[in-house]
Amino acid sequence: MSNEIEVKLNHINKSFGTFQASSDVSFAIEKGRLIGLLGPSGSGKTTILRMIAGLERPDSGDIYIGGRRVNDVAPGKRGIGFVFQNYALFRYMTVRENIAFGLKIQKAAKAKIRERVDLLTELVGLKDFGRRYPMQLSGGQRQRVAFARALAPEPELLLLDEPFAAIDAKVRKELRQWLRQTIHKLGVTSIFVTHDQDEAVEVADDIIITHRGRIEQTGTPIEIYQKPRTPFVADFIGEAVHVPDFTVFKGFENGTTTGAHEGIIRPEFLEIGANDSEMVMPLASEDGVVRGVYFRGNNAEVDVEVKGQLLKGARSLELPPLHEGDRAKVFIHRVYSFAGGKTAILENRAKQTNSVVI
C-alpha cells in the first residue's frame, strides 16, 4: 500500500451567508484509497467534495491534489473525474458517445478515443450496449456509463456525489460491490459522499465523518465502529440507543470517575433471554418487558423495556420466539459512556474481564 498523499485539505473554511458549511476542515488521503465522506444532511460533506472539485471556492485554507495547490486551478485542469447522483448523461448521445465526451473535449486522437471507450465499456460490463441511448438503459446501467465517462480522461482523482441515491435497493447493493472491486482494480484515488452508513461501511477503505461543518472522526470502518471518539459518532454509527443514566443498570452502578452517566447501548451489547435458564449470568441480568419483535431475516429484532428505558437487541430465530408483552431477561455486556465529551467502553462488572471486543 502506498503512503503517498494524493489529497490534502488544510484548515478549510467555507460559509454561505450565515451558514458555516465547513469549519477548520483538515484531512489527508493516501493515493489509491477509496474514501467515504459520511454524515447527516447539512453536515458539510457535499461542500467538501465540491471544493475539491473546484465547483466551490474555500473562504480560507488550502487544497492540494497530487502535491499541487489547486485553490486557483480551474475545475477542468485539476485532473478530476466527477460522477453525479443523477447520472447527468447526454440523452441524445449513445453509451459510447457519452463515454468519449471528455476525450473529445481534450481533442484526443480518434484511435485513442476508440481504444479507451472499448476498454471502459468492457470494464463496466456494457460492451454490447454501446449503441444504446441512456433512456434504453436501467438505472444501474446508466450509473455505470457515468462512471466510465468520468474515468475516460484517466483522472488522478475520482469524486462521486451520492452515486447510488437514484437506484433501487437491490441494484444499489450490487453496484456497491462492483464499484469497490472496480476502483481497487484501477487503483484510482476516490472519494464518495453518502449519508448511508451501511453504504460507507461496505464500500469505503476509510471513512471521514462530518457533523455541523467539522470533521468528527476519520478511520477505517472497523475503527470508527468499535472506537468512536465522540458522542456524535457513537450515536450516529450503528443502531444505537441513547440512555441518560446507565448507572441504573446492574454492573454499571459505579458509573465513571467523572460522574458522567450518559451513554449509548447498541443492540449487540445486549443478551436477551426468555428466562433465567437461557442466560449465562442470570443473577446479573435485568428484568424486562418485550415491547416489539421484528423479523429481520437472519434474526429477530427485539425492543425490550428495562427500568423505564427502551433498549434494542437481537435474538436468534433458533430460540423460542418472544412476543410483545412477554417477560424477558436482559444482560447488558457493555455501554459507551460520554465522560468529558469523549467516549469510553465500560464493561459490565459482572463479567470480571477487561475485554472490549465487540
Image (tube, rainbow, N blue to C red):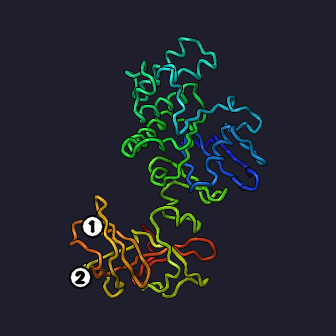
Res 222 seen here: yes
Pick whichever of labels 2 and 1 is earlier in the sequence: 2
Which structural element holds mark 1? loop
Along the line of sight, the residue nearer the viewer: 291 or 172: 291
* Residue depicted at 47% across the width and 41% down the height: 166
When asked about the image quadrant of residue 31, the answer is top right
Question: Looking at the picture, does residue 265 appear above or below residue 132?
Answer: below
Crowding around mark 1 (Cα neighbors within 10 Å: few <14, some 14 to 19, many 20+) is: few
Crowding around mark 2 (Cα neighbors within 10 Å: few <14, some 14 to 19, many 20+) is: few
99 sits left or right of 279 in the view: right
Question: What is the quadrant of the C terminus in the image?
Answer: bottom left
Q: Residue 277 has which mark? A: 2
Question: Looking at the picture, does residue 260 appear above or below residue 85?
Answer: below
Q: Residue 124 has which mark? A: none
> Residue 245: x, y in percent?
52, 82
When asked about the image quadrant of residue 135, the answer is top left
137 sits left or right of 300 in the view: right
What amino acid is labelled 1 in the image? Answer: Ser
> Residue 252: x, y in percent?
47, 84
Q: CA distance from mark 2 to mark 1?
A: 16 Å
> Residue 89: x, y in percent?
52, 29
Along the line of sight, the residue nearer the viewer: 161 or 224: 161
* Residue depicted at 27% across the width and 67% down the height: 316
Res 116 seen here: no
Q: Which residue is mark 1?
A: 316
What amino acid is labelled 2 in the image? Answer: Ser
* Residue depicted at 45% across the width and 31% down the height: 142
